[in-house]
Structures are given as structure tokens and as C-alpha cells.
Image (cartoon, rainbow, N blue to C red):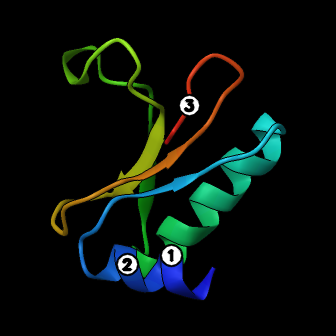
Amino acid sequence: MEQAVLLRRNGTDVGVIGKDLAANRSLARQIENLANGKVKRCPHHSNAGPNASPHFQPDPRPPEGHTFYETPNRKSL
């Protein structure tokens, strides 16, 4: 967790993986919130490719980067 928050503060993308969608989403929100304050949840972006994952990102931008999370149909890593 500490490392993920530090990476996000530096603008690096991170991903939360696991079998529990609710837990993944919750942890991704927590990481992004700790790293950047106010956040927004975004669905996968179709222009990012067919396997893009949903994510949280700072709101407003900058900083750049995302905290992705796995779903049953979309894998972060």
C-alpha cells in the first residue's frame, strides 16, 4: 500500500489485482485518494484498447497516471 501510494504520487500507474471486485475497487480508490486527494472513478477507455481496465484518477488533473483495478473480465496486469 505504501509503495503504491508513493508510485501514484510520482505519476506512475499502479494496478490492484485479485478475485474480489469490490475489494479491488475499494483498494484502488483508497490508494488514489491517499496519493492525490479528490478522485474520480472512470470506466475502461475504449481508445486504450480492448483489455483496458477501469480505474481511479485525480480530479482535477494533473497529476497524471491512474490506479487500475481488475474485474472478472478485465485484468490490470
How far apart are labels 2 and 1 at the CA level? 5 Å
Circles 3 and 1: CB distance less than 8 Å? no
Circles 2 and 3: CB distance less than 8 Å? no
Image vertical order of residue 21 relative to residue 32, above or below: above
Image vertical order of residue 8 relative to residue 15, above or below: below
Residue at 69% in and 60% down:
27
Q: What residue type is labelled 3?
A: Lys
Image vertical order of residue 67 relative to residue 19, above or below: below
Which mark, by number, is residue 75?
3
Circles 2 and 1: CB distance less than 8 Å? yes
Residue at 62% in and 36% down:
70
Q: Which amino acid does label 2 sit on?
A: Leu
Image-quadrant location for residue 14: bottom left
Which mark, by number, is residue 4?
1
- Label 1: how many residues lie within 10 Å, few (<14), some (14-19) or many (20+)? many
* Label located before the other in sequence (3 or 1): 1
Residue 59 appears at what percent x and percent y?
31, 58
Question: The residue tagged with tag 3: helix, strand or loop?
Answer: loop
Residue at 30% in and 23% down:
45
Locate the N terminus by quadrant.
bottom right
Nearest the viewer among 27 and 33 is: 27
Residue 32 appears at what percent x and percent y?
48, 66
* Label located before the other in sequence (2 or 3): 2
Question: The residue tagged with tag 1: helix, strand or loop?
Answer: helix
Image-quadrant location for residue 37: bottom left
Nearest the viewer among 56 and 49 is: 49
Residue bearing the label numbered 2: 7
Residue 47 appears at what percent x and percent y?
19, 17
Image vertical order of residue 22 relative to residue 44, above or below: below
- Label 2: how many residues lie within 10 Å, few (<14), some (14-19) or many (20+)? some
How far apart are labels 2 and 3 at the CA level? 20 Å
